[in-house]
Image (cartoon, rainbow, N blue to C red):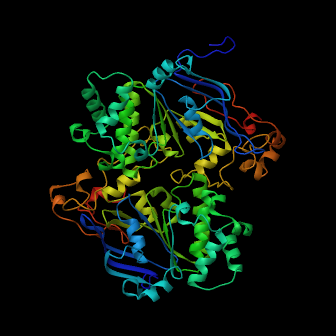
């Protein structure tokens, strides 16, 4: 731990000013600032949803936490220590941090049986005692019982929901302390969705495992997350408890996102124009200003903040863990 | 208008031939869509909703058996000769497919692709391509672009332009927004809604996501295992579903702000049935939490509910006092 930075003692994961930039594809092109200054902490056992449109950097951020993506700036601390770079340290770290991807069909090796898939992690991490017992227990814990019925099956013999359960069981055998779930239900059928979310929530509670769920679906955090972080163009623009953010959104982007979700009927629909924004050309001033309804409707001008919106990059205020904060000039008048 | 619907489907069966034997994908469906009306068709993968959509224009493999009748503007699609069928496709009913990136030809400019649809089915001038692009909110300089130069939302707009290019009566939209971001999805839904209103189009809107149906449809039909299990006015059905399956489907999308669903994700145990081996009796009974013994052997037909004029439900409990509209 460097002397000029203080990390809160009990956080499991702590991100400070994390930047990830992808170099330009061709000469003269611009750098993509995929993650552009993110602060985030996760407590043990906490479920945090990272919400945003595609291209907002949420998957890059997840990769950075896993140590799969080099940071261009900033620090990530897991359990009070930086993510290791040596082979032995990496191995230990990866045992504690597991990931579940969106598409279970793509995550599973079609030529491995369920048993081999779930046992693979145990073998890599040299824990082959009681292998059969651990694998069966993990499958049953993930809702595939009796486990014997599934052990020798291959992925193509399972439904989408069952496949995702196998993926989760494969992550759980290593008893991770942090699980990153990247759109864990978006490729699954509606009726199966709730069951998988319930499983994730129960696992987090029972094992005191922290979960970072990456999603574009705002109903998901309402179902399972303790806190929500809304991401826009590489930055978290609003964060707080799920109740606070979804019931009283502060940032105009969050309000717009909520207004187009049809299950949320209290807000007047505010459809933002244009495509998902481009991280190679982040606008000057507030990064949301080209699409901001407050700027477009003239409200920002009436409030006397338009110049700030166009010139100053708003920052998230300092905060305690559960405070509800947003990076918008309109909140500081 | 119901007496002269744009689309009238009666007792439609669609059975695929596979190496395992016949696979009944659609098993006796009745549908009506009036002029200017939008019917939402909801269901999970494998329930037969896409098969139904394709069968409406006979776009199924040649070995597939189709029976029943499909009356499109009074004419039976199933008995049409190939030449007549070609005239009906696109000019009377067109499809907006899901996954525009797989439907558009990657090595052809989009203007050419839209024009191709017009030429094949109608015959027209190049100004129409520009009109179509403008209609879906794309600038006419886009006509020279290739699909990879467009975003997902723009590609879906091109698909909509193609579907509208021959002025059809009916648009079949098969999961038109599924792969898109929330905000882009809202844009596309709004676009479809505006066009539908301006042109007085009828639409069959197919989706697995019940939540997108509440604002965009007049009536909703819920499909399970190749059959419609509940149909009725959109708001009424989505607020108070009667069939246990449609209820479970509605509950799997939480209402944000509703304390009942906070920290309580709801789902349905089990998996959608395999059309190759459907359960006996009511095909939903293995997953149903209110099934009674007779459900294992007796398959209840879709029939009107006592409580509401426009509702039809296929469930033994449909008329129970406690299960009626919430």
Where is residue A83, by image quadrant?
A: top right
Indicate the quadrant containing the C terminus of chain B: top left, top right, bottom left or bottom right. Answer: bottom left
Q: Is residue A59 left or right of residue A274?
A: left
Residue B201 in the image: state x and y as whole percent.
Answer: 55, 76
Q: Is residue A307 left or right of residue A233?
A: right
Q: Residue at x 29, y 31 (%)?
A: A135
State how many labels appear. 0
Task: Work out whether residue B290 can be spotted.
Answer: no
- The residue nearer to you, when weighing A215 against B107, is B107
- The residue nearer to you, when weighing A86 against B71, is A86
Q: Residue at x 35, y 64 (%)?
A: B223
Where is residue B160, by image quadrant?
A: bottom right
Residue B46 in the image: state x and y as whole percent.
Answer: 35, 60
Residue A27 in the image: state x and y as whole percent.
Answer: 76, 44
Q: Residue furthest top?
A: A3
Residue A144 in the image: state x and y as whole percent.
Answer: 28, 39
Q: In the picture shown, does residue B46 fall above or below B26?
A: above
Q: In the picture shown, does residue A265 fall above or below A112?
A: below
Q: Is residue A173 left or right of residue A308?
A: left
Q: Is residue B194 left or right of residue B19?
A: right
């Amino acid at each position: 731990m460097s002397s000029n930075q203080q990390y809160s003692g009990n956080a499991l994961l702590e991100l400070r000013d994390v930047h990830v930039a992808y170099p330009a594809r061709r000469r003269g092109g611009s750098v993509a600032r995929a993650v552009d200054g993110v602060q985030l902490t996760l407590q043990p056992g906490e479920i945090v949803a990272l919400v945003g449109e595609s291209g907002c950097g949420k998957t890059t951020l997840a990769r950075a936490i896993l140590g799969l993506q080099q940071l261009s700036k900033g620090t990530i601390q897991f359990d009070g220590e930086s993510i290791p770079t040596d082979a032995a340290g990496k191995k230990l770290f990866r045992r504690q941090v597991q990931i579940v991807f969106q598409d279970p069909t793509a995550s599973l090796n079609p030529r491995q049986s369920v048993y081999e898939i779930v046992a693979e992690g145990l073998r890599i991490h040299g824990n082959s005692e009681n292998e059969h017992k651990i694998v069966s227990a993990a499958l049953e814990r993930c809702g595939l019982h009796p486990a014997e019925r599934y052990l020798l099956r291959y992925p193509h013999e399972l439904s989408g929901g069952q496949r995702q359960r196998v993926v989760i069981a494969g992550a759980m055998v290593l008893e991770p302390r942090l699980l990153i779930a990247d759109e864990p239900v978006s490729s699954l059928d509606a009726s199966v969705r709730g069951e998988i979310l319930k499983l994730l929530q129960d696992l987090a509670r029972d094992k005191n495992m922290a979960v970072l769920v990456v999603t574009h679906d705002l109903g998901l955090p309402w179902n399972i997350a303790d806190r929500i972080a809304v991401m826009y163009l590489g930055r978290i623009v609003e964060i707080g408890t799920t109740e606070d953010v979804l019931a009283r959104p502060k940032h105009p982007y969050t309000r717009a996102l909520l207004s187009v979700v049809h299950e949320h009927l209290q807000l007047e629909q505010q459809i933002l124009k244009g495509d998902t924004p481009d991280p190679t050309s982040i606008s000057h001033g507030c990064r949301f200003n080209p699409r901001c309804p407050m700027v477009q409707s003239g409200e920002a001008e009436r409030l006397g903040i338009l110049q700030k919106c166009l010139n100053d990059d708003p920052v998230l205020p300092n905060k305690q863990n559960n405070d509800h904060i947003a990076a918008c000039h309109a909140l500081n008048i | 208008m119901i007496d002269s619907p744009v689309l009238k489907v009666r007792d439609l069966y669609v059975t695929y031939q596979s190496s395992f034997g016949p696979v009944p994908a659609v098993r006796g469906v009745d549908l009506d869509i009036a002029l200017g009306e939008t019917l939402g068709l909801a269901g999970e993968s494998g329930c037969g909703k896409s098969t139904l959509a394709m069968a409406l224009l006979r776009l199924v493999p040649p070995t597939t058996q189709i029976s029943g009748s499909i009356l499109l503007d009074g004419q039976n699609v199933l008995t049409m000769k190939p030449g007549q069928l070609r005239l009906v496709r696109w000019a009377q009913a067109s499809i907006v497919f899901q996954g525009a990136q797989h439907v558009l030809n990657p090595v052809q400019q989009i203007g050419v692709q839209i024009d191709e649809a017009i030429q094949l089915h109608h015959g027209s001038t190049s100004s129409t391509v520009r009109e179509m692009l403008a209609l879906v909110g794309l600038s006419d300089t886009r006509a020279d672009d290739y699909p990879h130069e467009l975003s997902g939302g723009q590609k879906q707009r091109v698909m909509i332009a193609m579907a509208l290019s021959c002025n059809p009566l009916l648009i079949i939209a098969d999961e038109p927004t599924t792969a898109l971001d929330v905000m882009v999805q809202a844009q596309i839904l709004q676009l479809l809604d505006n066009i539908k209103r301006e042109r007085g189009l009828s639409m069959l809107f197919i989706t697995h996501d019940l939540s997108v149906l509440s604002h965009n449809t007049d009536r909703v039909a819920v499909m399970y295992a190749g059959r419609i299990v509940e149909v009725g006015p959109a708001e009424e059905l989505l607020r108070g579903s009667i069939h246990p399956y449609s209820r479970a489907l509605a509950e799997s999308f939480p209402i944000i702000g509703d304390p009942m669903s906070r920290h309580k994700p709801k789902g349905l145990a089990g998996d959608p049935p395999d059309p190759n081996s459907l359960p006996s009796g009511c095909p939903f009974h293995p997953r149903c939490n209110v099934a009674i013994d007779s459900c294992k052997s007796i398959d209840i037909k879709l029939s009107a509910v006592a409580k509401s004029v426009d509702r039809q439900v296929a469930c033994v409990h449909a008329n129970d006092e406690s299960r009626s509209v919430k």
